[in-house]
Structures are given as C-alpha cells and as structure tokens.
Image (tube, helix red, strand yellow):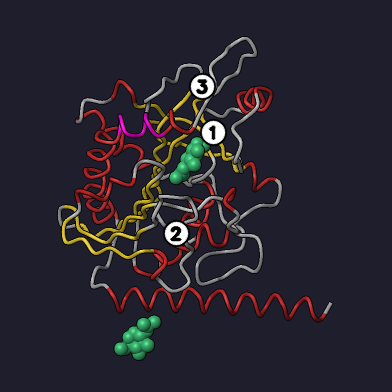
Amino acid sequence: GHSRGSQTRISEYRISKDYKLTHEWLLNHTSHRPKVAVICGSGLGLLADRAANKQIFRYQDIPNFPVSTVEGHEGCLVFGTIEDTSCVFMQGHFHLYEGYSLCQVTFPVRIFKLMGVESVLVTNASGGICPDFKVGDIMIIKDHINLPGFAGQHPLCGPNDERFGIRFPCMSDAYSKDLRRLAVEVCSELGCSDFIREGVYCMVSGPNFETIAEARMLRILGCDSVGMSTVPEVTVAKHCGLRVLGLSLITNKVSLDYSREEKVNHEEVLQISKMRAEVLQKLVTMLISRCQQQSINTH
Ligand SMILES: *[C@@H]1O[C@H](CO)[C@@H](O)[C@H](O)[C@H]1NC(C)=O
Ligand SMILES: CC(=O)N[C@H]1CO[C@H](CO)[C@@H](O)[C@@H]1O
C-alpha cells in the first residue's frame, strides 16, 4: 500500500542522485569526453593498451562505482584516445554471480551515456554451442536470449527512469546492423575472416558451467554460444539509445554429449583469451575509429 509506494520513490530518487554524483565526479577529474565505450571481458583487459593520453581511475576511487570482487582483478576505468577518437575502457566488469544487483552491473553504462558516449563495444568470452564453432572463433553477436530476464532478473525492472529511455523498449535491433557490417569488413581487412562467426548469445546467471541437459536445451532454443554476462549491459545500453556491438570469443566448446570426456575449466578460458588477445586488440582499435566515422556520416 502506501509505505511500499513511497519506498519505491525513495529508492528511485537515491539512484538518480547516485548517477549524478559519479557523473559529476568524472567530469571534474578528467577532460576526456568519450564517444565510444569498450567493456572488456575476462582476459581482454589489455584492449586499452593502445590508447594514447591515458588516464586511469580505480573503481574504488570513483564515488558510487561498484568495486570488483574477483581476486587479482583490479577494476579500472581507462580514458584515452585512439586515432583521435576519445574512448573509455572498462577493465573488469561485474557479474550477477558475484552477487551484484543488475542495477550495479549496468551502472557504468548509464554513466557512459551521461558522459556523451554514443557507441558501446562489448567483448566477452563464451562457450560455443553451435557445432560448427571452433575454440578461438570470434562471434559477432547478432541477437541474444536473456534467460535471467525470463525469470525476472532484469536490469530494467523497477521504476523507469524516463531520462534514460522508455518503459517498454524495443530489443529486436539491440545489436546495430551497421556496426555488425563494419565488424565483418574490418575482420576481412585484417585477414581473420576464417574465424569470424555471427550468432545468438545466451546469458545464464552462472557461476556453474552448463549441465549437458541444459546445453542441449539451449541448442534447441537456437543459441550459438552461452556466457554469464553482456546481456544486462546491452539491454541498458539499448534502452538509453546507445549503438551496440558485441564480440564474443569462443573459449571452449560446450559439451552436448554424455559420452565425451572433456570438461571446461576457467584456465582454458583464460588461455584462449590470451591467444586471441592480439587480434581482438587490433580489431577493436580499428572498430573504434571507424565506428565513430560511421556515426558522424549517418547522423
Ligand atoms: C565538481 O566541481 C565543482 C566545481 O569545482 C564542485 O562544485 C563540485 O562539488 C564537484 N563535484 C564533484 C562530485 O566532485
Ligand atoms: C569478464 C567476463 O565477462 N567474463 C565472463 C565471460 O563469459 C565467461 C563464460 O561464460 C565467464 O566465465 C566469464 O566470467
């Protein structure tokens, strides 16, 4: 009844004040005004290395910013420029399975929007479900299935903040067609078309890897790869009108067969990330400058 209504308003008020403080603090502490944000997945934190005029903030020093709990994973926000394009990199992101709320997981995306970011590139590792996929493939995300969202774990649950977007946003075009086309183009220029795929990413909450029955279910549902992140950030980015490109590195093949012995482990995931890091770094670097040009030309 009454008390519940006022509680909702209070938390809504608190949340928007949180964004304001973080946004203002960042504007005061950096002169960078990024147009492109890159969210770096596991083992892909090196993507920021090529940026010039870097300015680095530890998450723990930014007011209201969630802090990374994974050991040896210091979370940093890196501002810099790549070929004249001002960008911001998130090194280390937040997962549902670590105990963060989806509001915390997606908090940085709204801060990027407030700072003037126009495009978001998300990279992550995922397990290949599509039988044609090989370990080391890079999948351009064409669409996603928000499995936790089906069960009510959705980042846009709660009062809608109209300043960011509408109550019932469209998700049928969450991954920008133009950016996907651009990614294919850049990959062919880099000579890595052999291991570029396109497909549907499914988010599960984790932290355990899928059972065989679950993996078979996902296959039937049309998923090409499965991972434990990305979808909440993309959903919130799309809600507030950002252009999104998602790249997922296939670090293991999900077992769909009871007779097969191989088992997935986290070390394998990190090792494959390292192997492809260089290609991904080149790819993202080229994409950053080109996607900004594309956005200038089309707007
Ligand atoms: C930002 O700088 C302005 C002007 O100096 C100051 O009034 C404000 O309190 C600062 N805000 C934050 C969050 O640092
Ligand atoms: C940083 C990050 O997003 N890592 C996740 C990407 O997906 C893999 C596979 O599901 C997870 O194990 C990582 O934690």
Mark nearer the viewer, 3 or 2: 3
> To which quarter of the image does residue 99 belong?
bottom right
Q: Secondary structure at mark 2?
A: loop
How far is the residue under mark 3 from the one under mark 1?
10 Å
Mark earlier in primary sequence (3, 1): 3
Picture coordinates of residue 129 (x, y %)? Answer: 53, 24
Crowd class of label 3 (few under 14; some 14 to 19; many from 20; radius 10 Å): some
- Picture disc at residue 150: none
The residue carrying mark 2 is 241
At horizontal 46% and vertical 67% (from top left) the residue drawn is: 65
Q: Residue furthest right?
A: 1
Write down which quadrant ligand 1 falls in.
bottom left
The question of residue 17 being in magenta is answered with no
The residue carrying mark 3 is 130
Picture coordinates of residue 277 (x, y %)? Answer: 29, 36
At horizontal 24% and vertical 56% (from top left) the residue drawn is: 296
Q: Secondary structure at mark 1?
A: strand
Q: Is residue 152 above or below residue 128?
A: below
The residue carrying mark 1 is 226
Principal SS element in the magenta part? helix
- Does the residue tagged 1 have its C-beta within 8 Å of any atom of ligand 2? yes
* Quadrant where the image shows the N terminus: bottom right
The magenta span reads 270-276
How far is the residue under mark 3 from the one under mark 2?
30 Å
Relative to the observer, which residue lies in front, 13 or 296?
13
Q: Is residue 32 above or below residue 296?
A: below
Picture coordinates of residue 267 (x, y %)? Answer: 44, 31
